Amino acid sequence: MLHQTNCKINGVGLGLKRELIPQIQAAFGNNTIANLNFVEIAPENWIGIGGKAKRQLDWFAERYPIVCHGLCLSLGGLAPLNTDFLNQVQRFLQQYNIPLYTEHLSYSTDGYQGQQGYLYDLLPIPFTEEAVHYVAKRIRQTQDILGQRIAIENASFYMQAPISSMDELTFINAVLTEADCLLHLDINNIYVNSVNFAHDIGKGLEYDPIKTAHKFLRGIPGERIVYAHMAGHYQQARNLLIDTHGADVIDPVWALLEEAYQLFGVFPTCLERDNNIPPLAELMCEINKIAGYQRHTKSSLDNG
């Protein structure tokens, strides 16, 4: 039976990386990490583990809510969904009492001479009506196997399929509606895409990617948001940002988060840092900043 996901998370989370584990364990119970409320893991990295890694995961499961953010389901791929993997995910979620599984609205598999393989990248789905129906059907299949709703994340991308017949926001909203799933909102990806496709959207006219990012945000169905991602990126060129999760969050992305809270109310928010990972104390500066935005918004709403 499919049931509505009870998220059971709040506040601010952090993507759990192996090098951060001993630092969090050493600081647990200390006020310096008081604003760390949940952790996020990729199930692909933890399913079936044993030994020290399992003991570490067990330690976190006893002390923090955990959410799963998948990497390889390939919702937009041509190969059939990996139902064996999804059954493993379902058991893993139950084992660790994990309330939420999210995946990217992208594809990561392809085939050659009848053999399917993983591309180790997240590639954009063509924004077409046919793709809406196709992806929504695969999301519903995923939800049926897991017995719960999942959330899909708006992805960053660097090229658009020439056959696309709608814009990204229209595509996302159509998939959410047809699949009746939830939204894992990536704030940084909104900004990255608004910069990367300025030449397409602007059509040679004066174009402001920040205004476009905020306009995109205002088109999001806030009632479907379960939690958000905040991350940094790498600026390779003036109009090319790479979603590396390897740098500090920049001011325009902070401004988007602030407006998102004002538009939709405060929702759980997770800091991603996958590369150039600094010490936990430095990451806590950004976690504390997110918590500060949350407190300020709640106070404003309560007094408004």
Image (tube, rainbow, N blue to C red):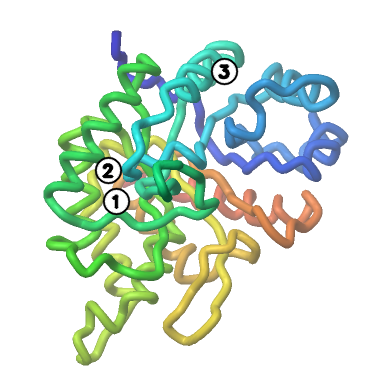
Circle 3 Cα neighbour tier, 10 Å, few/some/many (<14 / 14–19 / ≥20): some
Mark 3 in CB contact with mark 1 (< 8 angstroms): no
Q: Position of residue 17 (x, y in %)?
A: 71, 43
The CA distance from mark 2 to mark 1 is 8 Å
Work out which residue is located at the far top of the displayed protein and give it: 1
Q: Residue at x 35, y 44 (%)?
A: 77
**Tag in front: 2 or 1:** 2
Work out which residue is located at the far front of the displayed protein and give it: 113
Nearer to the camera, 27 or 59: 59
> What residue would you read off at disc 1?
263
Nearer to the camera, 16 or 260: 16
Which amino acid, by three-letter code, is at mark 2? Answer: Gly
Apparent side of residue 131 relative to residue 58 in the rendered image (left or right): left
Name the disc covering residue 222, or none: 2
Apparent side of residue 60 relative to residue 129 in the rendered image (left or right): right
The CA distance from mark 3 to mark 2 is 29 Å
Query: Which corner quadrant of the image does residue 116 belong to?
Result: top left
Q: Residue at x 27, y 72 (%)?
A: 212
Nearer to the camera, 109 or 239: 109
Q: Position of residue 1 (x, y in %)?
A: 29, 8
Mark 2 in CB contact with mark 1 (< 8 angstroms): yes
